[in-house]
Image (spheres, rainbow, N blue to C red):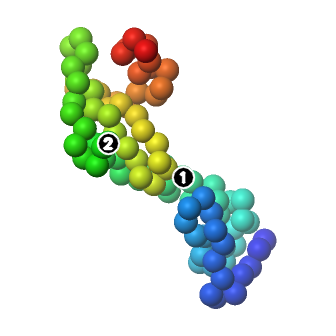
Amino acid sequence: MILLGDSDVWPYNGSMLSTQDINTGLSLHEAIEREQARRERGAWFPACGGSEVPCKVGHYTYLYMFQPSTRKHAYLCIETDLFLDADEADRIFGY
């Protein structure tokens, strides 16, 4: 277990892990996994600063989305409320 002083912070992928993250009794690896899980639950927003326009493919409408906490992009199917991974989007959009 790694314990840091009260004012110590560790850089982690663009943000900081604080001593509060580490002093919970978690190892550094566990603290990083916990932070990654928290980020993956982050909010999604329409891409292009919110100006992305939905597109219709077949019977479904898709919106290109962005998740700032993970810096990921994905397509959201409006009718089913499901996200498409890159392979699914390629197949549906014919890329």
Q: Is residue 78 visible?
A: no
Q: Is 30 positioned to the left or the right of 53 in the image?
A: right
Task: State the image coordinates of residue 16 (x, y, percent, origin top left).
Answer: 58, 70
Label 2, on which residue?
47
Depth check: 83 or 49 in front? 49
Label 1, on which residue?
37
Q: Earlier in the sequence, mark 1 or mark 2?
A: 1
**Element under label 2?**
loop
| Crowding near the residue tagged with mark 2, few <14, some 14–19, many ≥20 C-alpha atoms within 10 Å | some
- The image quadrant that residue 61 belongs to is top left
Depth check: 64 or 23 in front? 64
Rendered residue at 34%/47% (across/down):
44
Task: Classify the position of the N terminus by image quarter.
Answer: bottom right
Residues at marks 1 and 2 touching, judged by CB atoms closer than 8 Å:
no
Q: CA distance from mark 1 to mark 2?
A: 22 Å
Rendered residue at 62%/87% (across/down):
7
Q: Amino acid at mark 1?
A: Ala
Rendered residue at 55%/66% (across/down):
15
Depth check: 67 or 36 in front? 67
- Of badges 1 and 2, the one in the foreground is 2
Q: Is 55 positioned to the left or the right of 24 in the image?
A: left
Total count of labels: 2
Task: Classify the position of the C terminus by image quarter.
Answer: top left
**Element under label 1?**
helix
Q: Is 15 positioned to the left or the right of 3 in the image?
A: left
Q: Amino acid at mark 2?
A: Ala
- The image quadrant that residue 90 belongs to is top left
Task: State the image coordinates of residue 27 (x, y, percent, origin top left).
Answer: 73, 66
Task: State the image coordinates of residue 20 (x, y, percent, origin top left).
Answer: 59, 78
